[in-house]
């Protein structure tokens, strides 16, 4: 504490709506015990009514008068008042001018944080950066039921922060049981979180099955159609018709089947039909007769009559084309012409279609298991309810997913989980209309390096993922599905998604575009505190949002099992003995 003998002259010399300016004679003595103040430290400013205004120091400056005497100036951002042991945001109840300025004691700062929430609500994963003895609780409900953004440059500790938050969340319990009811799905683009969650429900390219028939129209066409091609419209029209009819064929017990219905269809039968469309010929004398060479009729003298060919309605034709590829009489015969799509319209489409479906690296979408896997099995696996492994964390390793379908993969999984929340809420509301909690199994979706698949871009290859995740950002909270976006380039994330976040953990950001982007989305009341982002140490962060009593610069706790995101020690490794490369093994892994 400040002794009576010191008698420091510290006084408020000006008050503004968003800051207070304080003059101090001897700054080196203006401290608590032996701890000097710094940017981010707290002050208490009192009046005669025993009410303390709590302010956070934003900057220091020095003024020198004509006699060479120094006067220290402190600018602080007022946060709220401490009265009768309770902290209240805002400072309207403080008298002007306030009479006394002192550094806030550790007990007073602890009072601000510790009394903010009930024990049941508290969730703690950090300490105050200026005093590690002061733990910073946040409201766990307001943190997880609102969207979260974790931003920071490479090396700022972003991945460790994400790991710490999730590790502490899955360990929290209010009873004696093995697993709590936390459910987290992590999209791990760089394969770095497996070491942090060894007991997770681990999904990678080797066991991932996302059958093509669950893809919606945009996702299917994004994979199979080439945007901007001359015949794109015709290709899309044919494809939509065939997929819809094939879904009806394989789901005859259902009355409402549409192109977007998430039900099974046989992609090989659709390919058969497309190839038949490419090759078909028709009787020019009777256009509903198709010149399939199936030995049921003969062409005499190289010409046809009005009864030549197989007469079929449109639906009969499609059904027959699904069965297999047919041989058609050539147009060199008289009165035989090409079909509507036999002019080359579908040629490139068919070749690309069959190439995509047959690629080994896309077998998780189009492989044999995609025709046998059930929707129930997929959903149970994604939610951590696999029969042999119930897990709080589902870790989806995307490192082996081809980049051209990465966005679609994320889109499909996100959409399935969002729709789970939607239909589960509807089911609970119907069964228990009086129930206030409409989803008792809420889910957090963690998008690591989110700018990779939901960028601030209008390119068609990102459209499906943006639509899926933007829908969750705007509507997911109502259905018990929330987001945690982690990114080193926040300025490249879709603004629609990022602006929906209510809680921010802003770590060191060095790129000016990223700094300005984050500043634009954070509250104006932070003042100059936000300018500390470029100078934060590894593991330090500006924690702000609805879940915390007041914006704070915190030190994130170290995680128990760190993710494998540490920097490679180049200099140490370079000094070791020359190492041989297993080129053959690398090539085999490369081509998997």
Image (cartoon, rainbow, N blue to C red):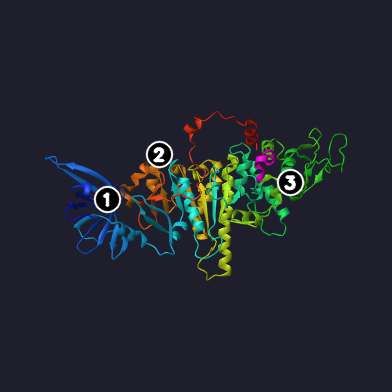
Name above or below for residue 133 compared with residue 409: below
- In the image, residue 147 lies in the stretch drawn in magenta: no
Q: How many marks?
A: 3
Residue at point 62%, 54% (across, down): 381
Which one is in front in this view, the residue at disc 3 or the one at disc 1? Answer: 1
Residue beneath disc 1: 34
Tell me the SS state at disc 2.
Answer: loop
Could you say where residue 315 lies in the image, as x and y percent from the top left?
A: 74, 50
- In the image, residue 356 lies in the stretch drawn in magenta: yes
Q: Is residue 496 visible?
A: no
Could you say where residue 129 lies in the image, as x and y percent from the top left?
A: 36, 50
Judge left or right: residue 41 versus residue 580.
Answer: left
Give the mark, 3 or 1, whose residue is nearer the N terminus: 1
Residue farthest left in this picture = 67
Could you say where residue 530 lies in the image, as x and y percent from the top left?
A: 34, 47
Indicate the quadrant containing the N terminus: top left, top right, bottom left or bottom right. Answer: bottom left
Q: CA distance from mark 2 to mark 1?
A: 36 Å
Residue beneath disc 2: 511
Which one is in front in this view, the residue at disc 2 or the one at disc 1? Answer: 1
Give the mark, 2 or 1, whose residue is nearer the N terminus: 1
Could you say where residue 248 lies in the image, as x and y percent from the top left?
A: 70, 54
């Amino acid at each position: 504490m400040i002794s009576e003998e010191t008698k420091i002259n510290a006084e408020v010399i000006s008050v503004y709506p968003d800051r207070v300016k304080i003059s101090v004679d001897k700054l080196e003595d203006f401290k608590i015990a032996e701890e000097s103040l710094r940017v981010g430290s707290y002050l208490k400013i009192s009046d005669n009514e025993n009410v303390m205004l709590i302010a956070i120091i934003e900057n220091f400056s020095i003024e020198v008068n004509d006699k060479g005497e120094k006067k220290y100036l402190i600018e602080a951002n007022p946060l709220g008042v401490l009265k009768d042991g309770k902290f209240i945001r805002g400072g309207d109840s403080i008298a002007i001018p306030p009479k006394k300025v002192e550094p806030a004691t550790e007990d007073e700062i602890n009072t601000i944080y510790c009394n903010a929430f009930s024990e049941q609500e508290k969730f703690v994963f950090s300490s105050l950066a200026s005093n590690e003895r002061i733990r910073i609780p946040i409201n766990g409900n307001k943190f997880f039921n609102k969207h979260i953004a974790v931003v920071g440059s490479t090396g700022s500790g972003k991945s460790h922060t994400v790991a710490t938050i999730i590790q502490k969340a899955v360990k929290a319990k209010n009873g004696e049981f093995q697993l709590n009811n936390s459910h987290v799905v992590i999209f791990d683009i760089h394969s770095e979180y497996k070491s942090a969650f060894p007991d997770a429900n681990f999904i990678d390219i080797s066991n991932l099955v996302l059958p093509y028939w669950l893809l919606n129209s945009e996702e299917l066409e994004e994979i199979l159609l080439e945007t901007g091609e001359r015949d794109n419209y015709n290709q899309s029209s044919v494809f939509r018709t065939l997929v819809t009819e094939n879904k009806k064929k394989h789901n005859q017990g259902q009355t409402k089947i549409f192109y977007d219905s998430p039900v099974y269809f046989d992609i090989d039968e659709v390919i058969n039909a497309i190839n038949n469309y490419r090759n078909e010929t028709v009787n020019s004398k009777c256009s509903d007769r198709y010149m399939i060479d199936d030995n049921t009729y003969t062409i005499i003298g190289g010409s046809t009559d009005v009864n030549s060919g197989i007469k079929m309605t449109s639906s009969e034709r499609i059904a027959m084309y699904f069965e297999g590829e047919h041989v058609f009489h050539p147009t060199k015969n008289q009165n035989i012409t090409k079909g509507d799509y036999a002019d080359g319209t579908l040629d490139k489409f068919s070749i690309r279609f069959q190439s995509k479906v047959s690629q080994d690296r896309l077998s998780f979408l189009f492989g044999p298991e995609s025709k046998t896997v059930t929707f129930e099995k997929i959903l149970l696996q994604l939610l951590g309810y696999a029969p042999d492994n119930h897990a709080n964390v589902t870790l989806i390793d995307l490192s082996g997913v081809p980049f051209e379908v990465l966005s679609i993969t994320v889109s499909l999984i996100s959409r399935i989980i969002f729709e789970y929340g939607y239909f589960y809420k509807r089911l609970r509301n119907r069964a228990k209309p009086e129930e206030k909690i409409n989803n008792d199994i809420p889910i957090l979706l963690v998008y690591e390096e989110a700018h990779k698949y939901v960028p601030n871009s209008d390119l068609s290859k990102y459209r499906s993922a943006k639509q899926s995740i933007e829908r969750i950002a705007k509507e997911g909270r109502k259905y018990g599905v929330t987001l945690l976006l982690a990114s080193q380039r926040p300025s490249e994330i879709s603004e629609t998604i990022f602006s929906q976040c209510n809680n921010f953990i802003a770590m060191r950001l060095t790129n000016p575009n990223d700094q300005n982007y984050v500043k634009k989305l954070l509250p104006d009341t932070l003042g100059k505190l936000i300018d500390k982002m470029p100078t934060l140490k590894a593991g330090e962060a500006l924690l702000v949002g609805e879940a915390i009593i007041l914006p704070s610069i915190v030190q994130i706790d170290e995680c128990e099992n760190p993710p494998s995101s540490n920097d490679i020690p180049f200099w140490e490794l370079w000094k070791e003995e020359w190492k041989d490369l297993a080129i053959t093994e690398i090539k085999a892994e490369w081509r998997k």
